[in-house]
Image: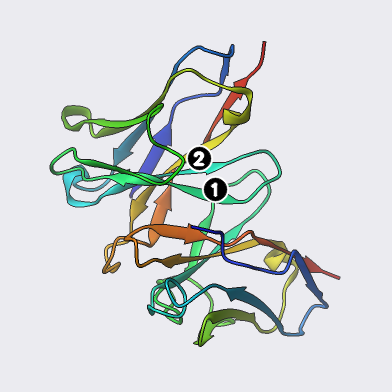
Amino acid sequence: QSALTQPASVSGSPGQSITISCTGTSSDVGGYNYVSWYQQHPGKAPKLMIYEVSNRPSGVPDRFSGSKSGNTASLTISGLQAEDEADYYCSSYTSSSTVVFGGGTKLTVL
Amino acid sequence: QVQLVQSGSELKKPGASVKVSCKASGYTFTSYAMNWVRQAPGQGLEWMGWINTNTGNPTYAQGFTGRFVFSLDTSVSTAYLQISSLKAEDTAVYYCARVYSRSVYGDTFDYWGQGTLVTVSS
């Protein structure tokens, strides 16, 4: 199972919006509405931000939103804040009953 | 509150074995599956597989069969990851991660351990 494809890096200024893409295949992202997004600050464990494409767990700000079209899922962060600077990973359930992660995207807040 | 506390960093020589523990608290251990995730230095997350905390039945991802073993001790609410015949490329941070209660296929993880760095070097 190949890793999902994410851009290596994205950047934005405080207050702006950014979108991170996550491209898979019809056997994972495109085949199921089970895409999750995680935020990871340096030296810390990942934190769940989005599940089932667009749902936010309790406590996650509504500045974070998710969507999906075909084989590509997206995470959008609006009203960018300094503390949003981190690595972001998507993951998906697969037709093999496994989980696959994306390669990760480094978000820089300028 | 839910906590997953992992054992400390390990420095091992090639060919040795290591056992990483993940002690759960704040919830019923056998009600949620436990997953293991690897992160090599400077690299992304890699799903290793999961263990059914009710039955003890493990499922391993491709690339994590043979030398990797998931186990449990439900009496102390602890999951274990054992890696044998260690190689330099096993150097990574290993995380345990609990399945999110709303996850239909067990593919989403809401609580993570702090990670255990395993370094394999001669």
User: Residue A33 occupies which quadrant of the picture?
Assistant: bottom left
Disc 1 element: loop
Mark 2 and mark 1 in contact? Answer it, CB < 8 Å: yes
Q: Residue at x 65, y 43 (%)?
A: A43
Residue furthest to the left: B55
Which colour style is shown? Answer: rainbow
Name the amino acid type tagged 1. Answer: Ala
Q: Is residue A72 above or below residue B43?
A: below
Instruction: Report the side of B82 relative to B8 (left or right).
Output: left
Q: Which residue is mark 1?
A: A45
Left or right of A97? Residue B39 is: right
Residue at x-position 47% and y-position 75%: A29
Query: Considering only vertical position in the picture, is A42 above or below B65?
Result: below
Task: Residue B15: give x, y in percent of width and height.
Answer: 52, 12
Which of the 4 image quadrants contains residue B80?
A: top left
Q: Is any part of residue A38 visible from this angle?
A: yes
Q: Residues within 10 Å of mark 1 (few under 14, many from 20)?
A: some
The quarter in which the C terminus of chain A is drawn is bottom right
Q: Inspect this view and state whether residue A50 appears.
A: no
Residue A95 on image: x %, y % = 35, 67
| In this rendering, position of residue B27 left or right of residue B7 | left
Where is residue A103? Give x, y as percent: 63, 59
Quadrant of residue A20 within the rendered picture: bottom right
Which residue type carries mark 2? Answer: Gln
Mark 2 falls on what kind of element?
A: loop
Q: Residue B79: percent from the left, percent from the top?
A: 30, 33
Q: Which mark is residue B114?
A: 2
* Distance between mark 2 and mark 1 Cα atoms: 6 Å
Q: Residue furthest bottom?
A: A69
Residue situated furthest right in the rendering: A110
Parent chain of label 2:
B
In the image, residue A40 sits, relative to residue B118, either above or below, namely: below
